[in-house]
Image (tube, grey):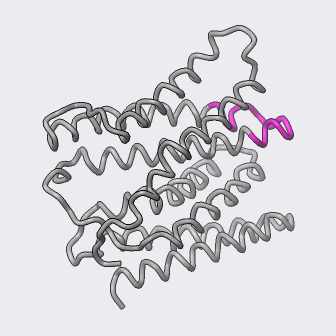
Amino acid sequence: MTPAGVSLTCLYLAAGAYAGGVAFFLLKKRRLAGLLFICGFIVHTISQVLRGWFIGIFTPIGIFEGVFFLPWCLASLTAVLSFFKKDRDLILSSIIPVFLFSLIALFYPNGVFPPSPNMQTIFSPLFFVFEGLAHACFVLGAWFALGYLRRREEAWSFDNLIVWGFIFYSIAQVTGALWSYLGWASLFNWNNRHLQSAAIWCFYAAYVHLRYLSGWDMKRKAAFSLAGFVVVFILSYLGHLTEINMPRLGG
């Protein structure tokens, strides 16, 4: 079986494990849910690594493609948080968005974009890594904000994630500008991709300054975080739909 076939099989297995984890979580069988999440994450990691070998030689393009990389980043953040935070029940609930975004990836074209001279720089994968991590922080931040609004969970559950997401996204903008300069001789282009990234950055820059405004308690910041998910989903994630029919290799 080709790396593409093994990768897709592992992605199906990971999504199945996540689905089982969601079922056991809803049935309040936390230990089984956690075990299935760990199994799913391991297989999911194998799937992501194999995407780098789709064209016979290693290239990071496939590994860091947004639709496939985001659910893995969500799972990674969930695993990291489980080691540092005491509210394991809240953290384990993250398996729900992990499964949902993994499910979307199953219906997305499985090939990788052909490598281009414009992407032959370290700043290209760095941009996608930090952008993916930022998006994962924004998604989980919104998810925990929803839990905060419903049950008044601890404020860390969304506020710290949003702040870290803004830091990662800021780094992504710097590495993206360097990549743009090396690839297209310009730090910024007036196209949809760059303008949407700038809009997302401005939105979360506003969020991190809310603490200096009177009247913006954690409840309002949680609502702002949920609005941020909508902004990211529309301006960034849905943009992948325009790439569905683009030529791919190894799919």
Vertical side of 76 occupied by 244: above or below: below
Q: Residue at 16% of width from left, 50% of height from top?
A: 118
Q: Is residue 152 magenta?
A: yes
- Magenta range is 146-159
Of the 4 image quadrants, the one containing the N terminus is bottom left
Q: Position of residue 143 (x, y in %)?
A: 69, 45
Of the 4 image quadrants, the one containing the C terminus is bottom left
Vertical side of 6 occupied by 160: above or below: above
Vertical side of 220 occupied by 113: above or below: below
Q: Most prominent secondary structure in the magenta stretch?
A: helix
Q: Nearer the viewer, residue 154 or 166?
A: 166
Q: Residue at 67% of width from left, 60% of height from top?
A: 95
Q: How many marks?
A: 0
Horizontal side, residue 187 vs residue 159: left or right: left
Q: Residue at 37% of width from left, 80% of height from top?
A: 4
Q: Position of residue 152 (x, y in %)?
A: 84, 35
Q: Is residue 191 magenta?
A: no
Horizontal side, residue 69 vs residue 246: left or right: right
Residue 184 lies in what quarter of the image?
A: top left
Q: Position of residue 177 (x, y in %)?
A: 26, 34
Q: Position of residue 12 (x, y in %)?
A: 55, 78
Q: Residue at 21% of width from left, 48% of height from top?
A: 122
Q: Nearer the viewer, residue 231 or 94?
A: 231
